[in-house]
Image (spheres, rainbow, N blue to C red):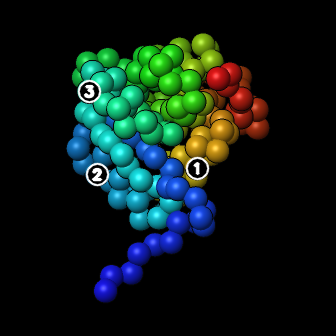
Amino acid sequence: MTETNEPARAGSSPIRVFLLDDHEVVRRGLKDLLEVEGEFEVVGEASTAAEALARVPAVKPQVAVLDVRLPDGDGVTVCRELRSRMPALACLMLTSFADDEALFDAIHRGGPPVICSSRVGGQDLVGAVRTVAAGGSLLDPKLTASVMPGCAPGSARIRCPR
């Protein structure tokens, strides 16, 4: 008999997560990282913006983890479109580009609730998914400071309107 992880939130349903990244190995790694915790269920995946826009409404996740740069668009636009259809959906943006213009645009327009560097540690990413699933919001202080000069690391937490 194999041992299974008990959900950290006893008696509650797992947090439903959708993954969008054009790299299969990244999606697989994220899925493994989340599902080993026992409190997350990856309900769908996509490698393009078009696939995500078609699949996410069908599987109704609570959280969408979206890559900022995609072959057919960007995660910020995907997030905006999905949230216009599903206002309760929480989006977590991943980027490896500290100077990404889409990231800067997202911050200035009150974009997605959480923006993380893809260089963040595994447990920090898991914590970020928990934060947005619970309705919280934050920006990676180092990343924010790099795209918004003058942002103090202590002031990088924001609450985005829903």
Using the numbered discs, state the Cα–Cα distance from disc 3 to disc 1 in whole angstroms. Answer: 25 Å
Rendered position, 27 above or below 92 = below
Residue pointed to by mark 2: 28
Q: Which residue corresponds to the image point at 33% horizontal and 82% vertical from the top-left?
A: 2
Circle nearer the N terminus (2, 3): 2
Evaluate whether residue 131 shows in this view.
yes
Q: Which residue corresponds to the image point at 50% horizontal and 24% vertical from the top-left?
A: 86
Query: Where residue 136 sits in the image (x, y, percent)?
Result: 67, 39
Disc 2 vs disc 3: Cβ atoms closer than 8 Å? Answer: no
Q: How many marks?
A: 3
Residue pointed to by mark 1: 130
Marking on residue 51? 3
Q: Residues within 10 Å of mark 2 (few under 14, many from 20)?
A: some
Quadrant of the drawing holding the N terminus: bottom left
Q: Is residue 52 left or right of residue 117?
A: left
Q: Amino acid at mark 2?
A: Arg
Q: Which residue corresponds to the image point at 25% horizontal and 39% vertical from the top-left?
A: 23
Q: Amino acid at mark 3?
A: Glu
Nearer to the camera, 14 or 115: 14
Disc 3 vs disc 1: Cβ atoms closer than 8 Å? Answer: no
Query: Where residue 137 sits in the image (x, y, percent)?
Result: 66, 36
> Could you say whether the residue bearing mark 3 is in a helix, strand or loop?
helix
Nearer to the camera, 71 or 101: 71
> Could you say whether the residue bearing mark 1 is in a helix, strand or loop?
helix
Using the numbered discs, state the Cα–Cα distance from disc 2 to disc 3 in whole angstroms. Answer: 17 Å
> Could you say whether the residue bearing mark 2 is in a helix, strand or loop?
helix
Query: Where residue 148 sits in the image (x, y, percent)?
Result: 62, 21
Q: Which residue corresponds to the image point at 38% horizontal and 49% vertical from the top-left?
A: 42
